[in-house]
Amino acid sequence: MDITAMGLTELGQLLAGRQLSAPEIARAFLDRIRLEDSRWHSYLTLCEERAMTRAKAAQRALDGGTAGPLTGLPLAVKDNICIHGIRTTCASRMLADFVPPYTATAVERLEGAGMVVLGKTNMDEFAMGSTSQTSCFGGPENPAAPGRVPGGSSGGSAAAVAAGLAPAALGTDTGGSVQQPAAFCGLTGLRPTYGAVSRYGLIAFASSMDQIGPIARTPADCRLLFRAMAGQDPRDATSRKGTPPAAGGDAYIKTIGLPVEFYKDLSPETAALAARTAAAFENLGWRVREVSLPSYRYGVAAYYLLSSAEAASNLSRYDGVRYGLSGRGNTYAERVTDSRNRGFGREVERRILLGNYALSRGYYQQYYQRAAAVRESLRAEFDALFSACRLLLVPTAPEPAWPVGQKDSQPAEQYAADACTVPASLAGLPALTFPAGRTAAGLPVGMSLMGRAFDEEALLDAAEAFLEGGGV
Ligand code: GLN
């Protein structure tokens, strides 16, 4: 039996049926990580002993009949999500020695449900990037497309699941970092509605868009994790219980919109798979119609402005005195300068510069306020679309995973490749990425379903039906 080839649902059934024990499962994944992760570099830190101790405790719960659906199942966690006592680096020299004194609510809830954390996964530094190659420890590689990037910034989480080094993982999505790596690695990933999952214990990048989301083999596995994590948390004032929107009439319930702007500038194979995905939904009984989201064209610019502005402010706490890499020097100014010079990589510096510029006097109105206005237009346009369509179907990325190194020196090109995922972030809406098929060369292509706030279950149902129907 190949334990490491299975997802959460399958492993859970074997645990419940007593065909496997929680320590056996944890052992199998940890052994495979030791053997194979030098190739993929998906993990930054392993917590082997802690995992085995918890797996044994989970087994006692299983034996005692107090287990839930997640008890004893392993999980990988992106390295910007804090766990008490486990080094959490954000893949930055700035936090290379940081050991958090508290645990993120999302992890606390999953561990409370009996999950076993195997380790912390590689990522773009401070979650800024689309390849995971800005990690100060060196980037991971894509096990579903060797030689290519696993996407970013949650590339280590996606790579770990794709390589069979974890049955599921947590990523974080500010502008597509759950969706795009899931797509690049042939997996399923859910960006929850803003506020659906607590951000407490998630190291901030752009607080108005950051969300923790699952990356897994199937929508069913994402659903298990999402349900266990979601809900209001007194430690995050933006978290909400949220009620799914009212269903509406029959025609509405079965209508999927294809916003035409998302379908321009796709690679030919992505475009072909996107068309076949839409056709497959039609065969499943959905009414599929073209719609329009005019402000889409300003999405990337608005996202990079707003997210960099928030990042500049969030990252100002790393001064090498109160937070971050200890700075050298005789004066406060010298210490701050030294800490930030040595602590931050190039991409993070670029965002801080851009963000502070956009927020500076004289430019604030010209840049920040205009980006904020784009955000408002996008929200209004989405509202209008969702009064006529239950869901929207969009490509996750304009092209599949590119070779490692190919776009490293072209940040603007990488930013442009986020066009399909940033609208959900700006509007605070949920988006579920699922595998739509592969190119002739075998590269995974993902599609995303978007919905109204707190309509995650509808996204999961629709993707599940699509995959059960055999895909494209
Ligand atoms: N690629 C986007 C960026 O670099 C998204 C990152 C994210 O979602 N964390 O900002």
Image (tube, rainbow, N blue to C red):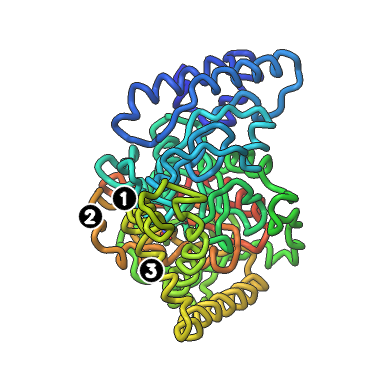
Number of numbered discs: 3
Per the model, the C-alpha gap separating discs 1 and 3 is: 38 Å
Residue under numbered circle 2: 406
Query: Vertical placement of 442 versus 412: above or below?
Result: above
Per the model, the C-alpha gap separating discs 2 and 3 is: 24 Å
Q: Earlier in the sequence, mark 1 or mark 3?
A: 3
Query: Vertical placement of 430 versus 23: above or below?
Result: below
| Residue 292: image location, x then y, percent | 51, 77
Q: Amino acid at mark 3?
A: Leu
Q: Regarding mark 1 in the picture, which secondary structure is present there?
A: loop
Q: Is residue 278 left or right of residue 195?
A: left
Q: Amino acid at mark 1?
A: Thr
Q: Earlier in the sequence, mark 2 or mark 3?
A: 3
Residue under numbered circle 3: 353
State yes or no: discs 1 and 3 in contact (Cβ < 8 Å): no
Q: Which mark is in front, 1 or 3?
A: 3
Query: Vertical placement of 105 versus 60: above or below?
Result: below
Instruction: Compare residues 244 and 391 and report the one nearer the observer.
Output: 244
Residue under numbered circle 1: 439
- Residue 76 visible, this orientation: yes
Instruction: Compare residues 242 and 337 and report the one nearer the observer.
Output: 337
| Residue 468: image location, x then y, percent | 54, 42
